[in-house]
Image: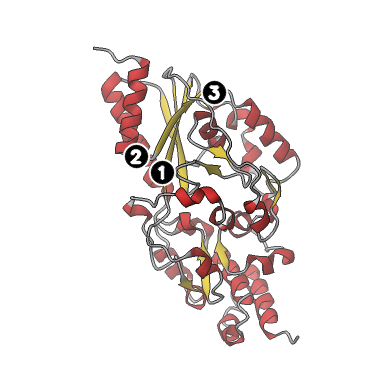
Amino acid sequence: MEMTSAQLKAQIEQWAHEFGFQGFGVSHCDLSKHEQALQQWTDAGLHGEMEYMVRHGSKRSRPAELVPDTLSLLSFRMNYLPADAADSWATIHNPEKGFISRYALGRDYHKVMRNRLAQLAKKIEAQIGPFGHRAFVDSAPVLEKGIAENSGIGWMGKHTNLIHQRSGSWFFLGEIYTDLALEADGAAENHCGTCDACITVCPTQAIIAPYKLDARRCISYLTIELHGAIPLEFRKPMGNRIYGCDDCQLVCPWNRFAQPTIEVDFAIRHGLDSADLVALFEWDEETFLRRMEGSPIRRLGHERWLRNIAVALGNSETPAIVESLQAKLYHPSELVQEHTRWAIEQLTAHP
């Protein structure tokens, strides 16, 4: 007996939960509202060096241009916050420790979620026969937050992260573009209200207006996306944040309801939830590549890893670590040398 469209959609939702996703929704292909917002954002240059945001033109916001014959967009949500992670604020306020965004403490989410979506697609195929589909996890020109918002599995917060009433914002997104004609869910309702906690807490004032982020000021951009020198004006506000920044999520009231991840792959590796800065700075490239195997941090590269840690060490107000910094003054990378010199100056400057 053939399944109806509604039955298939309900079955996909059940399978999604079985494969470890905490949210599932279906959206239509009309992303015109989000396309306009993206265009205004990039026209203003707020994307900084993230050239990939404009490289593919309208393919990002017009799904059928990226995957012909696409009729429905399936959106999936997976929690990532490890239950046993060290308290984030305690780590941020400890100048001897390095803070790493909680999404990057375990294995690379791209592989984990792509595998699950591939398995889910096989389930669907076994049920209905061959069908057109393509899965994405932050790996192609896909307007994932807009799709997720349209599918009802979260709304865009003032910090531009997606929020769900019962799951907060500590989750990853994945999508399947398909030629299946499934009924779309309603768009998520925004529940930010008059709250401006995320705007107020941002160390670099990167949220320049509600729902508008200047990536060039954002610590996540500065520590992960930016390839060159970190602008001087942002080095002190960075504090000890060496890979990403979670401040806007940490103060969001909706994260009181966030549920920890159940995924073993997202478990903390190498004590990265509260690691010693000096110890991390002493990793040579071989050690960095070996320990970051399978981690999203590995794509940063050793050079920028040292750049970020040098800034954090310079903000530590601990003169005793100058010796550790001096060991990198003759590093082959001018980028590392320059940030190391800056750090030493911060620690040796007389009041």
At 56% from the left edge and 75% from the top edge, which residue is drawn?
Answer: 95
Could you tell me residue 288's position as x and y percent?
Answer: 45, 67
Residue bearing the label numbered 2: 116
Residue bearing the label numbered 1: 78
Return the mark for residue 29.
3
Q: What amino acid is labelled 1 in the image?
A: Met
Q: Quadrant of residue 192?
A: top right
Which one is in front, 95 or 109? 95
Q: Are marks 1 and 2 in contact (CB under 8 Å)?
A: yes
In front: mark 1 or mark 3?
A: 1
Residue 281 placement, left or right of 83: right
Which one is in front, 102 or 38? 102
At 63% from the left edge and 44% from the top edge, which residue is drawn?
Answer: 158
Between discs 2 and 3, the one toward the N terminus: 3
Quadrant of the snapshot with the C terminus? bottom right
Q: Quadrant of residue 7?
A: top left
Residue 335 placement, left or right of 78: right
> Label 1 to label 3, Cα distance in Å?
22 Å
At mark 2, the secondary structure is helix
Total tally of numbered discs in the picture: 3
Which residue lies most toward the front here?
194
Which residue lies most toward the left here?
1
In front: mark 1 or mark 2?
A: 1
Q: Residues within 10 Å of mark 2 (few under 14, many from 20)?
A: some
Return the mark for residue 312.
none
At 31% from the left edge and 26% from the top edge, which residue is drawn?
Answer: 11
Could you tell me residue 4's position as x and y percent?
Answer: 33, 14
Could you tell me residue 277's position as x and y percent?
Answer: 51, 74
Quadrant of the snapshot with the N terminus? top left
